[in-house]
Amino acid sequence: MNGKNNIAIGFLTMGFFMAYGFFLIYLRDFAPGKEEWANAYSIGKHFETRLAHVHGNLFAFLNLLIGYFLLRFHDKLKHVKAISWLALTGLLMPIGILAEVYLGFPPILVLIGAICMTISVVWLGLSFLKMKNLQD
C-alpha cells in the first residue's frame, strides 16, 4: 500500500456517497412522508444520514489527497503503509453512521474510523514537517 488504493477507494467511496446524496434528495422531495422527513432536519435519522453523507465525501477526499501525497513522496516519507491503512480505516466512520441508522449497530465503527483518520492526517503532517527536502 503506497497510496494507490487510497486514491482508488477514495474515488469509489466518493461516488457512493454522492449517489447516496441523490437518495437523500429523494427522501426530502419525492418520498411518501417527505414533509415529516424535512421537518426532522436537525434531529434523528435525518441528521445522522446527512452526517454520513458529508463525512463520507470528506473522508473520501482525504483518502484521495493522502493517497496522492503518499505516492508522490513515498521515497521521502516513513510509515507510508501505516498511514495509508489508517486513512482507509477512517472510512469506517461514515460507514458506521449508516450502519447505526439502518442496521442498529453500536457507534464503535464511527469512533474507530474517526480516530484512525485523525491519526493518519496528523501522522502525515508530522512526516512532512520532519522531511528534510521536498525537491526531487
Image (spheres, grey):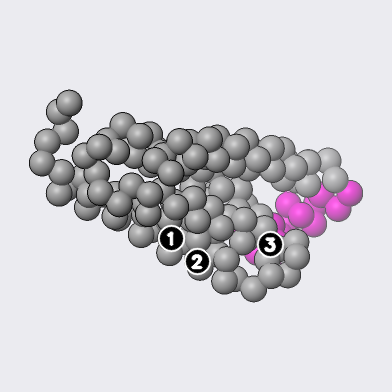
| Foreground residue among 100 and 40 | 100
The answer to whether residue 39 is magenta is yes
| Foreground residue among 77 and 25 | 77
For residue 115, above or below residue 124? below
The answer to whether residue 42 is magenta is yes
**Side (left or right) of 128 relative to 32:** left
**Side (left or right) of 10 relative to 100:** left
From where the camera sits, is residue 136 visible?
yes
- Residue tagged 3: 99
* Amino acid marked by disc 3: Ala
Measuring 15% from the left and 28% from the top, which residue is drawn there? 135
First of labels 1, 3 by sequence position: 3
Q: Which residues are magenta?
A: 32-47
* Amino acid marked by disc 1: Cys
Measuring 62% from the left and 56% from the top, which residue is drawn there? 95
Mark 3 element type: helix
Measuring 39% from the left and 40% from the top, which residue is drawn there? 2
First of labels 3, 2 by sequence position: 3
Can you give x and y, in whole percent of width and height, for residue 116 in the image? 43, 60
For residue 115, above or below residue 75? below
The secondary structure that most of the magenta stretch takes on is: helix
Can you give x and y, in whole percent of width and height, for residue 127 in the image? 22, 49
User: How far apart in space, not on screen, are marks 1 and 2 (Cα)?
Assistant: 6 Å
Residue 112 tag number: 2
Instruction: Bin the neighbour count of mark 3 within 10 Å (Cα to Cα): few under 14, some 14-19, many 20 and up.
Output: some
